[in-house]
Image (cartoon, helix red, strand yellow):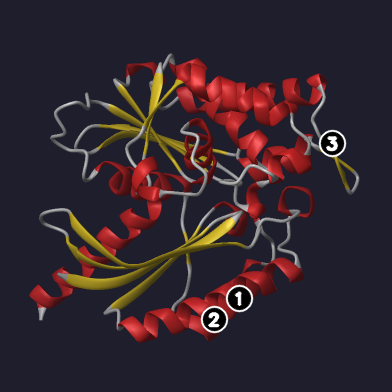
Amino acid sequence: MTRVAAIDCGTNSIRLLVADLDPETGELKDLDRRMQIVRLGQGVDRTGRLAPEALERTFAACREYAAVIKSLGAERIRFVATSASRDAENRADFVRGVVDILGVEPEVISGDQEAEFSFTGATKELTGHPHIELPYLVVDIGGGSTEFVLGDETVRAARSVDVGCVRMTERHLHHGQEIIDPPTADRIAAIRADVAAALDRAEEVVPLTEAATLVGLAGSVTTVAAIALGLEQYDSAAIHHSRISLAAVREVTERLLASTHAERAAIPVLHPGRVDVIAAGALVLLSVMERVGAQEVVVSEHDILDGIAFKTAEDVEEDKKGR
């Protein structure tokens, strides 16, 4: 087993996984898995820059993660940054801060690389499952972008498009500094139009309707699943590989879109950092399911973070063989 640390820094959250892995068998043993909502992508869609306060929130989380990694003695750290830092003019400030704290340079990966990591993390343990049909369509709904990946044992087609829960909230559910809450019908229609256009772009590359199994990843999907399951507190074991029907996703989405901030905040399983953006995230998921024709989504707690960890462990093993 190889011990590695993987960090996934997205538009809304930054997550850490320290794990022992066997790349050959696909075995993964969590030592520490944690997440913080830092909203790195705050305002990026509008300004094109990372806000100073967003950078500081992210660096504070990095300092905490550095202490965890040191205490557990990972052989290698890999830090992957996604949508927000791809889009930002001042990403050099972000890179410099991460290097100072963690000693590694963040890889600002392409949408296609993001898609491949997500696919590996989500499907490695599904291979050979008796009740899961191939091919998979893995859909990773992030804060700034959504990745679509079609494949079986390997990736056949992938595309990343710029719709996510934070981007859709900032673009359509804000009026100046005020949040339109609950959103009006015309704002909901505007999100749906953006998502439909993004699905058209995705379908130029990825044949969305060829999938036999839809696999959903990331916080918007797992939160919708938790609400649909009626959980009183977040339970990864109950959520992981749960099957949530189209009808249940529609019911949860309609509930969230009709709720005020206070009503959403009162949902016990909803992380405080997702209260403002979950309605848009749920609507993205619902729109995807309707377009794909999926009657259910298989929810995975394993995603890009696990894919990063597997690839890092493979690299460590290759380096050892080359010595």
Determine the CA span between mark 2 and mark 1. 6 Å
Task: Tell me if 79 is positioned left or right of 269 in this view.
Answer: left
Residue at 76% over, 54% down: 43
Residue at 60% over, 51% down: 271
Give the residue type at disc 2.
Arg
Quadrant where the N terminus is found in the figure = bottom left
Residue at 81% over, 20% down: 186
Query: Number of callouts in the render?
Result: 3
Quarter of the figure with residue 67 = bottom left
In x, y percent, where is residue 170? Answer: 76, 43
Q: Are marks 2 and 1 in contact (CB under 8 Å)?
A: yes
Q: Which residue is mark 3?
A: 180
Badge 1 element = helix
Q: Earlier in the sequence, mark 3 or mark 2?
A: 2
Badge 3 element = loop
Quarter of the figure with residue 150 = top left
Q: Which residue is mark 2?
A: 63
Q: Which residue is mark 1?
A: 59
Determine the CA span between mark 3 and mark 2. 35 Å
